[in-house]
């Protein structure tokens, strides 16, 4: 029998030739006195090591919370059915279901089959359960099945409040996640990022394409008419929000979201209904401290961009009578400072009708 000496290499490059010291986490190198036989042994050992470790890579990639994995396996087809019927990305539906119901393990999901935390407001006449949330006696919708909960969630998102989301591609899960937050679906400031993290960790975006062709889901949404007639007095916060967004549909412009100010509006009311603070509304729309928006004004719910949408590349804006630099910046969703800088204009410049302004 041939004799082998073991050279053990540690981080400190300490060598130990004692045979019994060959234990993990040291790296073991066998050096044979007969090179040919030794190389064969090394080759066999390396082959065995590769065969044992190679299955571990995909296994690690599939790791996740077991309840989440089980939930996705059970309900992904239901989410895809909703996508085909209502054009809501399956990844968004699944991520919201996972987040809102704790992967189906929450008390509300178990007691009421409610996987999306939807309350009884909005004309609900069905059964409900009482649970402490924003208030100790909040009422949540109760469903006969999880499928009913998924269908009701889709109908909930078909309201005018979320109309701008359907202008996005059904594969734009990031845009949908951020849009849900901007439209007031949740008050948690990290809600959009939580959805995106879940979608990417569990690769839920793969369910947004059925049969490899999602073109049939991407239809333009019709603009909702603005109702200006008197509305009944709401009896709850949820009903007040429903009435508000019926007259203030959220629209998209330059990868941003905005509403149009209506008669009787003021910043405190808009702030309360949109869950965007007054300070942020002023900052996003570059409003002076004592200035109030007037009916017809565009009011953005996120910070404006540095330039106009790409579709305006190489297309200047022709100044119209009555326009100011501010109204032009609001029209294209551009920060006022950037509009001045793009055109190398002083801050006291007054636009002249017929002049051309660069906006991209």
Image (tube, rainbow, N blue to C red):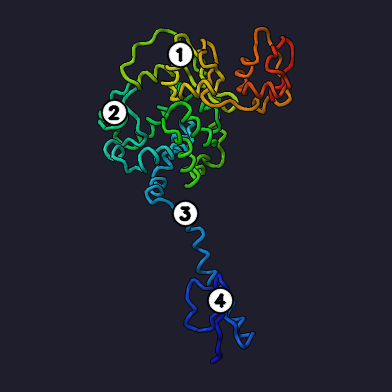
Q: Which residue is mark 4?
A: 14
Q: Is there a contact, CB below 8 Å, between mark 3 and mark 1? A: no
**How far, Cα to Cα, is label 4 from label 2?**
65 Å
At x 35%, y 39%, the residue is 101
Q: Would you call the spot at circle 1 few (<14 residues within 10 Å), some (14-19), or many (20 or more)?
A: some
Q: Which of 81 and 46 lies nearest the eye of the viewer?
A: 46
Q: Would you call the spot at circle 2 few (<14 residues within 10 Å), some (14-19), or many (20 or more)?
A: few
Q: Earlier in the sequence, mark 4 or mark 2?
A: 4
Numbered circle sitting on residue 277: none
**How far, Cα to Cα, is label 4 from label 1?**
74 Å
At x 47%, y 32%, the residue is 88
Between marks 2 and 3 in the image, the one whose residue lies nearer the viewer: 2
Q: Which of 341 and 51 lies nearest the eye of the viewer?
A: 341
Q: Is residue 222 above or below residue 202?
A: above
**How far, Cα to Cα, is label 2 from label 3?**
39 Å
At x 35%, y 11%, the residue is 232
Q: Which residue is mark 3?
A: 62
Quarter the C terminus occupies: top right
Disc 2 element = loop
Quadrant assignment, res 308: top right
Numbered circle sitting on residue 266: 1
Q: Is there a contact, CB below 8 Å, between mark 3 and mark 4? A: no
Q: Is there a contact, CB below 8 Å, between mark 2 and mark 3? A: no
Q: Which of 257 and 58 lies nearest the eye of the viewer?
A: 257
Q: Earlier in the sequence, mark 3 or mark 4?
A: 4
Q: Which residue is mark 2?
A: 135
Q: Earlier in the sequence, mark 2 or mark 3?
A: 3
**Residue 267 % position (x, y):** 46, 16
**Residue 151 % position (x, y):** 38, 32
**How far, Cα to Cα, is label 3 from label 4?**
38 Å
Q: Earlier in the sequence, mark 2 or mark 1?
A: 2
Q: Is residue 56 left or right of residue 151?
A: right
């Amino acid at each position: 029998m041939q004799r082998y000496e073991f050279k053990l290499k540690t981080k400190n490059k300490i060598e130990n030739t004692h045979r019994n010291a060959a234990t993990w986490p040291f790296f073991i190198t066998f050096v044979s006195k007969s090179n040919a036989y030794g190389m064969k042994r090394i080759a066999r050992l390396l082959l065995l090591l590769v065969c044992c470790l190679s299955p571990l890579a995909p296994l690690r990639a599939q790791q996740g919370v077991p309840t989440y994995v089980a939930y996705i396996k059970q309900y992904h087809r239901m989410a895809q059915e909703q996508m085909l019927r209502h054009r809501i990305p399956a990844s968004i539906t699944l991520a919201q279901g996972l987040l809102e119901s704790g992967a189906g393990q929450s008390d509300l999901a178990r007691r009421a089959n409610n996987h999306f935390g939807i309350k009884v407001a909005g004309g609900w006449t069905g059964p409900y359960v009482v649970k402490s949330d924003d208030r100790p006696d909040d009422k949540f919708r109760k469903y006969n099945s999880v499928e009913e909960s998924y269908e009701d969630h889709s109908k909930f998102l078909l309201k005018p409040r979320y109309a701008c989301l359907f202008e996005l591609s059904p594969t734009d899960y990031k845009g949908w996640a951020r849009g849900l937050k901007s439209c007031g679906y949740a008050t948690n400031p990290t809600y959009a990022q939580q959805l995106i993290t879940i979608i990417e960790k569990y690769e839920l975006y793969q369910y947004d394409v059925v049969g490899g062709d999602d073109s049939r889901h991407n239809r333009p949404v019709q603009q909702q008419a603005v109702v200006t007639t008197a509305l009944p007095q709401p009896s709850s916060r949820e009903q007040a929000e429903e009435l508000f967004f019926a007259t203030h549909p959220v629209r998209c412009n330059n990868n941003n979201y905005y509403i149009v100010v209506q008669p009787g509006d003021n910043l405190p009311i808009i702030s309360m209904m949109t869950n965007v603070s007054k300070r942020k509304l002023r900052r996003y729309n570059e409003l002076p401290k004592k200035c109030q928006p007037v009916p017809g004004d565009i009011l953005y719910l996120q910070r404006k961009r540095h330039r106009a949408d790409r579709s305006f590349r190489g297309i200047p804006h022709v100044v119209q009578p009555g326009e100011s630099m501010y109204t032009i910046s609001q029209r294209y969703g551009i920060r006022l400072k950037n509009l001045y800088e793009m055109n190398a204009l002083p801050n006291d410049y007054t636009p002249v009708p017929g002049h051309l302004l660069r906006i991209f």
